[in-house]
Amino acid sequence: MTNLERLIQELSPNGVEYKKLGDVGTISRGGNFQKKDFVEQGVPCIHYGQIYTKYGLFVDSTLTFINEEKAKKQKMAVKNDVIMAVTSENIEDVCKSLAWLGDGDVAVSGHSAIIHHTLNPKYLVYYLHTEHFNSQKRKLAHGTKVIEVTLDRLNDVMLPVPPLEVQLEIVRVLDSFTLLTAELTAELTAELTARKKQYNFYRDLLLKKECKSEKIKLKTVCEIYDGTHQTPKYTNSGIPFVSVENIDDLYGTQKYISPEAYTKYKIKPRIGDVFMTRITAGVIGKCTVVDRDTDLAYYVSLALLRPNAEVLDSKYLKYYLESGWGRKELSKWILWDATPTKINKDDIGRVLVSIPPLDVQKRLVQVIEHFDTICTDLNIGLPAEIEARQKQYEYYRDLLLTFAETGSTLVTDRQTELSAIKLIQYVFGYVTMPMGSLFDFRNGLNKGKDFFGTGIPFIRYTDVYNNRFLRENNVTALVECTPAEIEKLKVHRGDVFFTRTSETADDVGWSSVMLDDIGDCVFNGFTIKATPKTNFLLPEYCAFCFATDDFRQYVTSHCAFTTRASLTGKTIAEYQLAFPSIEKQQEIVNVLSKFHILCNDLSAGLPAEIEARQKQYEYYRDKLLSFKEIQK
């Protein structure tokens, strides 16, 4: 039996009494100061908007102050009072509350309620964040654009009022769980931050691939405009007006101009246009894509880019300009000494951009937005875990406050995302790497003729020259070797062999791949063995790719020639090998193998855990929200 269960059994054996909020406290309205009244030092104050944007559940010091003269006319909360925001733009934030635990009084703004009560302040605040209270709040709230709950209706809110000893124990348990949740959330958030950095790395890596191609001036594929140079006359409604401060949320602006003023705009934004910050004390080159068919007026601090949709994808342009590569190009034209910093409209058109094929642009955008989703969408990825932790915390909180049974914390194993190589292969169809990054190279065994005829299998020069694929039954020669030689030169499945010397360049560099695990086996000194360092390549794929015209031309143009043509492992290591994904390699192998046989063969995935969590949540939610009330 837990200490809480013991206390409930001793002090409330028949259940817990429910009372109206107005019976356990008095509720008064806050004062009338505004944000413009804030000063750097003075009397502590809490503005209603800060309750759901700046503060947690419990506060003992404030972020803002008002002067003493202003404070004399305000309503004050004292230690242990609960302060509630009774007005909001949405139902979720209305009635958000905090407990004032500071030693002195604090001024409270309008649109707030001050609840002076006889309960434990933390207990009351914990309760005011439960689903039991929220279900009552939704019935009390009224309004459409602005949601409000009146003070007289708050008086009728019902809440369980256990003995103070029980309230204290509930607060103790919830405080401990709150700390644990905060620690877990901090760890997950840190990992999320790391993932965002990784996302930036992969984004720039993908774009770097295209930066190797020829660049063109942006003005050749994009029309470029800027907004009005005059500060407009604002109206209470009408056409939304945006500037640099709205780049993260175009449609959240609170500024408007009249429809008549908007008729003077020659260039009106349309879907697919890109807004870019060009005059700002912040970051120049930050972009957002217009995705709604909504009129928008815009200031001179924003440039409007209208890409030619036949050659340039809007989102690709956004991500390119925001990448390290795009910023590097922009910085060449930014007027750093100007106040504020800016880039002229015409100079934006001189910025060089890399334009891959349109289908590649779209695949690149798809990958980048996949990472964006992981970092921002609360339905998947790490944010889902953070949200799940928070919900789990809420369920346990409601459990205690409704005097039901407790549960246990669930632990999630997280999966890492795709490697850079797989991402590049997805977007571009292949990745290019030097052979030295993929293989280790070694020359083979040289011995006198007396050592041959007995011993372990031995791969001869002719075995490599005549066979693109090597099987155990192709290796018929034998050689006597020391244990050290076997350890140094042993052959494994996936090893690639290259002929390294011949009388002509055309006979150098022919390859063969071992496709069997052959046991103890070594190879001859006139060949080079390339041992894979990664699992990026299928052995069967290697058998085909080193027979291509491109590789053959590289070998013949890079081999050395004195009395004989020769090739070194160092030379092969410098060859840039382009290869697709393992899946695509397998497709290629399947097709080419059929032709090879025809020409040469004479005989011829967490979702489950998320679902389980959801079911478990539903079970506990329904069970935990059942509680016993004293029968009157």
Image: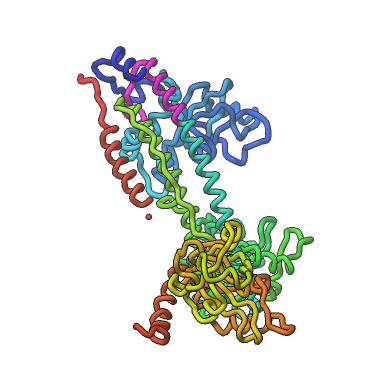
Q: Quadrant of the C terminus?
A: top left
Q: Which of 400/26 is in front?
A: 400
Q: Residue at x 36, y 25 (%)?
A: 21
Residue 273 visible (yes or no)? no
* Highlighted magenta segment, given as a residue range: 151-177
Q: Is residue 383 left or right of residue 283?
A: left
Q: Is residue 585 magenta?
A: no
Q: Which of 591/379 is in front?
A: 591
Q: Residue at x 30, y 12 (%)?
A: 10
Q: Is residue 175 magenta?
A: yes
Vertically, is 3 above or below 533? above
Residue 552 visible (yes or no)? yes
Residue 401 horizontal/vertical position (percent): 34, 27
Residue 1 horizontal/vertical position (percent): 32, 19
Residue 470 horizontal/vertical position (percent): 47, 73
Q: Can you name the residue that lies furthest to the right here?
A: 337
Q: How is the image coloured?
A: rainbow
Q: Residue at x 52, y 39 (%)?
A: 186
Vertically, is 626 above or below 53? above
- Among the 4 quarters of the image, the one containing residue 246: bottom right
Q: Is residue 625 left or right of residue 493?
A: left
Q: Can you name the residue that lies furthest to the front here?
A: 450
- Among the 4 quarters of the image, the one containing residue 346: bottom right
Q: Can you name the residue that lies furthest to the top here?
A: 10
Residue 598 horizontal/vertical position (percent): 38, 85
Could you tell me what secondary structure mostly forms the magenta stretch?
helix
Q: Residue at x 59, y 66 (%)?
A: 439
Q: Which of 571/488 is in front?
A: 488
Q: How many marks?
A: 0
Q: Which of 444/54 is in front?
A: 444
